[in-house]
Amino acid sequence: MRVITLGLTIAALGLTLAPGLAGEPLKIGDPAPGFAAVDSNGQTIRLADFAGKEVVLEWTNDGCPYVGKWYRSGAMQTLQREAAKLGAVWLTVASSAPGEQGYVNATQANADTKDRNADPAHVLLDPQGAIGRLYGAQTTPHIFVIGPSGALAYMGGADSIASTRIEDLQKAEPYAREALEAVAAGKPVPHSVTRPYGCSVKYSS
C-alpha cells in the first residue's frame, strides 16, 4: 500500500504518485492508497489507523455552491451522522491551495464545521493537494468509500443530479448513501463508479 505524508518533500512525491497524473487511475477493488495528514485539531491521522473499518472520504470547499447545496439542506451532516452510527469513519478533506477558493487553516476549518453543524470524524488539511491527487479527486464534493478490507468500494458523486438546487436532492439517486449502507451491510455497491460533479478541486499549481 502506498503511504504519503504531507510534508513538502513528500507532498511533491505525492504529485508523482497521483493516479490521475501517473496514468494509474484507481479502480474499484484496488487497495486504497495510504496517507498521513494533520487534521484541523493538529492530530496526525493515518488511513491505517482505521484498518478494519469502513472509511468515507469527502472532498469539500466551503465556497462551492454544490457543496453548499449539501450543507444548507443538512443532507451531508445527516449522512455523516448515519456513517458514524454504522461504525464508519468520515474524513472530510480540504485540498484547496492557499489563496484559492475553499482554502482553510485549522481555525477556519473548525469554524466551518461548527457553523455548518457538520459531524465528520476528522477534517484533513491538504493544502498541497497530496491526498487529493493521490485519489484523483476532481470535484467538491467528490466521495470515496473504502471497505473494511481496505479496498476501494465506491468513487464518484454524492448523488445523481448535477445541480446546486436543494430540491433536486429529493429526486436524485443517493449514490453516496447507497454506497455507505451497502458496504456497511457487506453487500455490493449498486453503482460503484459514478460521475462526480461540483466545483473543480483548487489544487496548487
Image (spheres, rainbow, N blue to C red):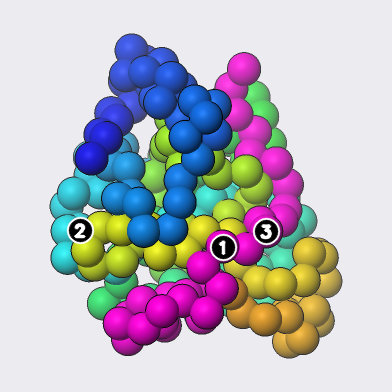
How many numbered marks are there?
Answer: 3
Q: Looking at the picture, which amino acid does disc 2 mark?
A: Phe
Q: Looking at the picture, which amino acid does disc 3 mark?
A: Arg
Q: Nearer the viewer, mark 2 or mark 3?
A: 3
Which residue is under mark 1?
193
Is 10 or 155 nearer to us in this picture? 155
Tell me: 171 left or right of 29: right
Which residue is under mark 3?
195
Which residue is under mark 2?
50
Q: Residues within 10 Å of mark 2 (few under 14, many from 20)?
A: some
Q: Position of residue 38 (x, y in %)?
A: 30, 37
Q: Is residue 21 above or below residue 51?
A: above
Residue at (25, 34) in percent of width and height: 3
Q: Position of residue 165 (x, y in %)?
A: 82, 71
Quadrant in the picture for residue 8: top left
Provide the residue span drawn in magenta.
176-205
